[in-house]
Amino acid sequence: MDSLAIAVVEWVINLVRAYAIAGLVFAILFVTLFIKQLDSGAQGWALGFRILIIPGVVAFWPMFAIRLLRGKGHPTEKTAHRLAAKQSAGAQ
Amino acid sequence: MGVAYKAVQWNRQKLVYDIILLTTVVFYLFFFEGISLHLSSDLDLKGIWIRAFGSAAFILLHIILSIGPLSRLSSKFLPLLYNRRHMGVTMFTLALLHARDALAWYHDFGNLEPIVSLFVSNTHYADFVRFPFEALGGMALVILFLMAATSHDFWLTNLTAPVWKTLHMGVYLAYGLLVGHVVLGALETNPHPFLSAAVGVGFVWIVGLHLITALREAEKDGVPLFSQAIKSNIDADGFVHIGSVTDIPENRAKIAVISGERVAIFKYDGQISAISNVCQHQNGPLGEGKIVDGCITCPWHGYQYLPDSGISPPPFTEKIPTFNVKIQGDQILVNAIPNPPGTPVVPAVIGQE
Ligand code: HEM
Ligand code: FES
């Protein structure tokens, strides 16, 4: 077997592991302490819900980290109509 | 969303679907084991379970991919659409069990970790028949994980519906990778003509179903796929002619394309209101829903909006764009430019100019 290929694959897998471990630490802090700052839908304790979203937070944690640092909530979607309405409001 | 999140919003119907789903899967797995042992008793049990999990996941994926187009073709399939999320998570779990067992079975010798061995034990990346089919399965599994992990409504709100939908469109990429995984895997480890034929039939079914549905949708919008689009006629005041009020049944809508997107024009209580057709939940088609208790009700998961403002009734907080409307004679006219989400609009009263 190609030892360079093994080294590269091992390196990439370690990188993914580091990202996931950092994500897990962030996710646990996020669902216990910070989630209400970003989404008003998270009310009460709702333990099942908070556990359920942990895998996704591990995957997307930088997105939530940036929103928390900027002090912003979740964005609203963009559709053709929303964009057109915004444009015409700006033109007036 | 304006209401508190819960882990799972079960109701009686969903619970029944989940029970049927899980029983069918468990039955399939043991049936597969029984048949395999019956056909050749010298097979290893672990090898059988790898195939049982893999094939169960792959079959379930076909069902999941069929539900979308089928429910566009006939509303009879809508109840399956509501339950698709749990099917997806079940499919991911089966695929994960398949991958875990395959890794332990084929890669846990030697001094390499199984996951490293997966990518380096076969490096024929330039060779078609000996291509490392397991890497294809691995990539598909990552996509399926991202989808299962973001299946809760929390993710729709926090990723926004368009981003979420794009991510979940990844299922088609995963499907393509898996067709490769199964066909090449079969060629390498389990050359059985029946398996390849079944994958072929499944592939033709999925592609055919999607093509038929896409053609029908394009026709409905007046944008036939293979000919020129019908121009909507905007008048001097910037209004678009929609047609007669008599075209629309009470508490229902007519759908027209204005400003690059579908608009739902509702008739109710002798009045007409128009709002963007795109539901803020998962972009469901509001114009295919009804007015229930004075609210436009999305046919997909029941989100509601007031017809004259596009705002969800409290405690909800969704807002969608509205359109100014006029009536001339029996003709409905809708402004070509949408109002900002949640803008109140005076409904046009039928028979009063
Ligand atoms: C890291 C991920 C994966 C690995 C390592 C893997 C490994 C394998 C292996 C070794 C086989 C050949 C088994 C045999 O014929 O004895 C196989 C076949 C198969 N895999 Fe995967 N797989 C992965 C992901 C997936 C996923 C995500 C799916 C589907 C959702 C899937 C579906 C299948 C199917 C349908 C077969 C053919 C089963 C049969 O031969 O009867 N695999 N996989
Ligand atoms: S798309 Fe889910 S309720 Fe409209």
Image (cartoon, coloured by chain):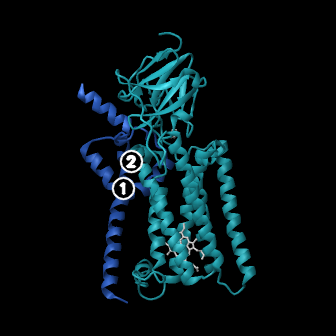
Please state which of residues B331 and A38 is positioned toward the viewer in this rendering: B331
Image height of B25 relative to B331, above or below: below
Viewer-proximal residue, B265 or B215?
Answer: B215
Of helix, strand and loop, which one carries label 1? Answer: helix
Q: Which corner quadrant of the image does residue B318 belong to?
A: top left
Which quarter of the image is occupied by the N terminus of chain B? top left
Using the rendered image of the protein, determine whether residue B85 is visible from the camera's viewpoint.
yes
Q: Badge 2 is on which residue?
A: B159
Residue B249 horizontal side relative to residue B124, left or right: right
Image height check: is B132 above or below A25?
below
Tally of numbered discs: 2
Q: Residue at x 61, y 80 (%)?
A: B47
Q: Nearer the viewer, mark 1 or mark 2?
A: 2
Write down the colour of chain A: blue
Q: Which residue ends up furthest to the top in the rendered image?
A: B352
Task: Please tell me in which quadrant of the rendered image residue B158 appears.
Answer: top left
- Can you identify the residue that label 1 sits on? A60
Give the farthest residue toward the right. Answer: B38
Callout 2, which amino acid? Leu
Report the residue at 47% width, 49% height from top: B226
**Which amino acid type is marked by label 1?**
Phe
Q: Which chain is cyan?
A: B
The residue shown at (55%, 39%) is: B301
Secondary structure found at label 2: helix
The residues bearing labels 1 and 2 have C-alpha atoms spaced at a distance of 10 Å
Where does residue B139 sit, x and y in percent of width and height?
Answer: 44, 68
Dividing the image into four quarters, tell me where ligand 1 lies. Answer: bottom right
Q: Give the percent coordinates (x, y) of residue B51.
A: 61, 74
Asked whether disc 1 touches disc 2, contact meaning CB atoms under 8 Å apart, the reply is yes
| Residue B220 placement (x, y as % from top left) | 53, 40
